[in-house]
Image: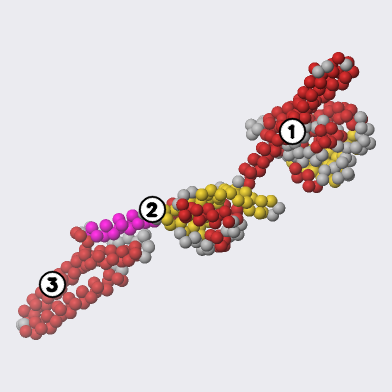
Amino acid sequence: MGSVNVRPFLSYIFVVVLVFAGMAVIIIPLLGFTERIIGISSLLGGLIVFMVLIMNIFEKYIKPIQSAARVADELVRGNYKARTYVSYFGEAGKLSNSINVLARSLQQITLQEKMQENQMSTVIDNMESGLMLIDEKGYVHMVNRKFLSIFGAEEKDYVGFLYYEVLIQEKIHKAVQEAFLYEDKVKVSFSIPTGLERKSVEAVGAPLFNEKKELKGAVLVFHDITELKRLEEMRKDFVANVSHELKTPITSIKGFAETLLEGAMDDTELRRQFLEIILTESGRLQALVHDLLELSKLEKDELRLEYGNYDVTLLVNDLLPVVRQQAEKKEIEVSVNLPDELVAVIDGERMKQVFINLLNNAVNYTQEHGKVVLTVSSDSNLLKIIVTDTGIGIPEEAQSRIFERFYRVDRARSRNTGGTGLGLAIVKHIIEAHKGSIYLESKVNEGTTFTIKVPLKPE
């Protein structure tokens, strides 16, 4: 029994004892000896009966009510774990049970609200879109993790401030104003400078209403569309480049064919010259289509390499005669540094494409009497391939784009060498498919070095 309950109980006992003691003081002196014994016994019996009755009343009525009052106070303070003394007697028992049911219901509701709040917070923080919540006065109430990654800074730098104080983009200000004014969704796009580049962002603003359809604020959702913009630009460039690359040989073939049909075919020497040009241009067209198909295969997610145990030394020796034949026309020295045997688990045909593309590029972009060196070795469970030339080199500003499709440092020279502009893009995709990496070092008029590292065995 708690101290809160004991105090009134003791008070009742004290009052009853005091009353009976007063009665004994008044009555006992007036009685004879025998009557005194009977009187004292009667008073003691009455006292015991009263104490039992008081205890019974206290346990069944007063204690449950006091306990219920105490638990009600705890519920008001937010302690929904509190429970009352349960009585099974009369209305006091019903009150105790009702208080406990209320407490359990409040506790369950609170737990559910906390779970929902945690779930909502987790969902909002892990959204792939930035989120900002603004009240009807324009104060920021909430931002999520993605928002901070887009705009930078910390949560404390936004929450509690007016939106136009923390966001400098005028298009965002306009979107919020229109969302409030027209009470409808508004979409805007803008860019944010990040170092040397810019981040493209799309924002959607929408008004927030309460149950009475009163405007209570706005929510802004920010989508980082930088990658989509980049892919769109790449798609446009790709279409433009393909069209341009196909236009040149097709125009040549069509032009010389028309010339032949107009009478040039009667001249044997001229006819042969034109037919050789048509053959050359059709060969370039065929090579371009072939490389496009190869690149398309390599870029597909379902690409599966045909792994096998290949001796890289034998693989290189098989293709060297073709490369040396091309190099001899320009009197370029081709030297190789190969181990006696180097077995790797690779896709042999794809790796042949890598060697041929790199060596052909090295020969094509090296001046006469230059030098091309191929070195193959193994290092820490990696196949290491190094192709070095003494050619024209690649400017520093072009090195980051050299693996892009159709990118050419010198377009006129590239076409004269018979290249399609897709060789290095194909090389990069094959190396990445092998879970490897490729690096470039180059200086203008000094030469270029490509370094490739591929696991000797796939994971």
| Secondary structure beneath label 2 | loop
Name the residue beneath numbered marker 1: 244
Q: Residue furthest bottom?
A: 29
Return the mark for residue 213. 2
* Secondary structure, magenta segment, majority class: helix
Residue at the farthest front position? 262
Q: CA distance from mark 2 to mark 1?
A: 58 Å
Pick whichever, 453 or 244, lies toward us.
Answer: 244
Classify residue 164 as left or right of residue 337: left
The residue under label 2 is which amino acid type? Lys
- Mark yes or no: residue 394 visible: yes
Residue lying at 74% horizontally and 33% vertically, measured from the top left: 244
Q: Residues within 10 Å of mark 1 (few under 14, many from 20)?
A: few
Q: Is residue 322 positioned above or below 431 on the image?
A: above
Q: Which residue is mark 3?
A: 45
Quarter occupied by residue 80: bottom left
* 98 drawn magenta: yes
Q: Quadrant of residue 195?
A: bottom right
Residue at (53, 53) in percent of width and height: 175
Q: Which residues are magenta?
A: 93-110
- Mark 1 / mark 3, whichever is N-terminal: 3
The crowd level at tag 2 (other Cα within 10 Å; few <14, some 14-19, many 20+) is few
Q: Is residue 261 above or below residue 126?
A: above
Residue 385: in magenta span: no
Q: Is residue 303 left or right of residue 118?
A: right
Residue 398 lies, in percent from the top left, at 78, 44
Q: At label 3, which amino acid type do we have? A: Gly
